[in-house]
Amino acid sequence: MSEVETTSFEECLQRLIDSLEASSYEDVRVQVAEMHPAEVARLIEALTPNLRMSLLNVIEHSIQGQILTELNEDVKIQLLAEMETNSIVKATEGLDMDDLADIVPNLPESALHNLLLTLDYKHREHLKQVLSFPEDSAGGLMNTDIITIRPDVKLRSVIRYLRLLGEVPQDTDQIFVVDRSFKFLGSITLSTILTNEPELMVEPLMEDNIPAINSETNSKDVVTLFQDRNLISAPVIDEKGELIGRITIDDVVDVIREDAEQSVLSMAGLDQDEDVFAPVFQSTKRRSIWLGVNLITAFIAVFFIGLFETTLQNTIALAILMPIVASMGGIAGTQTLILATRGIATGKVTNSNLKTLTSKEMAVGLFNGCLWAIVIGFLTFLWFENQQIAWIIGFAVVVNLIFAALSGAVLPSLLTKLNIDPALAGGVILTTITDVIGFVAFLGVASLVI
């Protein structure tokens, strides 16, 4: 059992910080000796930048590469920039091609040159092949460590071949069957190989309905396939149907985790790779962009408020009650926005059923609007003893919740068609819409009635 399993993360982190600050590197080595690389990576991300390199330096080179693959992009770049070229080369030796492909784009030129020299022609070609695919595609996720056999051999020969290899790649649950031109034919599970008579041929025992994933397939579709079929691994083929690699469940879990982090952070205009302890100027620059966007949208809302300046001057109660209308619309719209965004990401919401979803969400907005209009209107009447204002704010709440539902349902699909991440831009746009609709409905009706 590892250190972080028997001790809380906070206690581990504090002990590590104390040892690093006291330069007790032997204590540090003992503390992280039994930890998994992913656990060490989590600790590194929680350390301030000046302590990170100190921790990495006490760890064996063979483990450093595995730790680097687990780090977020910003922290990985920072450490690679501080590492010596020879250390980088030693740390990346023995990494799987998919893990190596994640590190290569961040390497200094000198380190990349030396690393490529350590690879034989076959591995260089494999690395080049993985790097040629987009990061969010099946080709970008795949690993090239595959075991293949022909359909016209006996199980006895397959077992002998596996013994000669000495070991099988991690998460290997099946052996892929190919013809002489390396076209994918099917697969045979390890359990089938071990539980059948050695004299049987591979062909009648292999499964030919195994889903082969095209290298250009989007990573989100890969996740859906693994989820629906309960896969541990799956073959990846090129446009000719030739087997070029495989995707394993650990790669899929990484995609799921990254997508979840991206969805949460994008709502606030943040990047999933942003370092918690990044330099002040770097964080300021990144965040100021979305603050500027928010400022523009705020001025749009203020502009519409300014159109009703006379009405607000005559009835101060309207100014007090305005935030209620805007906030109710914002919350209702965000609920629908998240639901629709998630539906699109999982493939449950498409153009064919978007109209149904929109109608349903608008109905929800109508019923919720009527319910809370009664509550808000009643409380407003008790507060200001003005029946007109109570009716006006109730009407505005109903209108805003209906438009909020409409916007929340339609925006993700529209932004996706424009190649804009709805999780990143949807919230800002939605807030502007609900603010403007709410203010116009509330103040517009007030200016006509009062």
Image (spheres, rainbow, N blue to C red):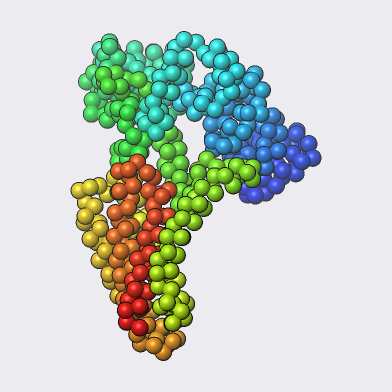
Residue drawn at 38 percent across, 57 percent down:
430
Q: Quadrant of residue 213?
A: top left
Image height of 306 relative to 213, above or below: below
Position of 259 compared to 30: left or right? left
Q: Nearer the viewer, residue 318 or 333?
A: 318
Q: Nearer the viewer, residue 77 or 429?
A: 429
Residue drawn at 50 percent across, 43 percent down:
272
Q: Quadrant of residue 218?
A: top left
Q: Quadrant of residue 174?
A: top left
Percent of width and height locating residue 405: 31, 62
Q: Nearer the viewer, residue 312 or 332?
A: 312
Position of 225 compared to 72: left or right? left
All told, the count of numbered labels is 0
Q: Is residue 129 visible in the rendered structure shown here? A: yes
Residue drawn at 38 percent across, 79 percent down:
376
Quadrant containing the C terminus in the rendered view: bottom left
Position of 357 compared to 164: left or right? left
Percent of width and height locating residue 385: 41, 89
Residue drawn at 39 percent across, 52 percent down:
426
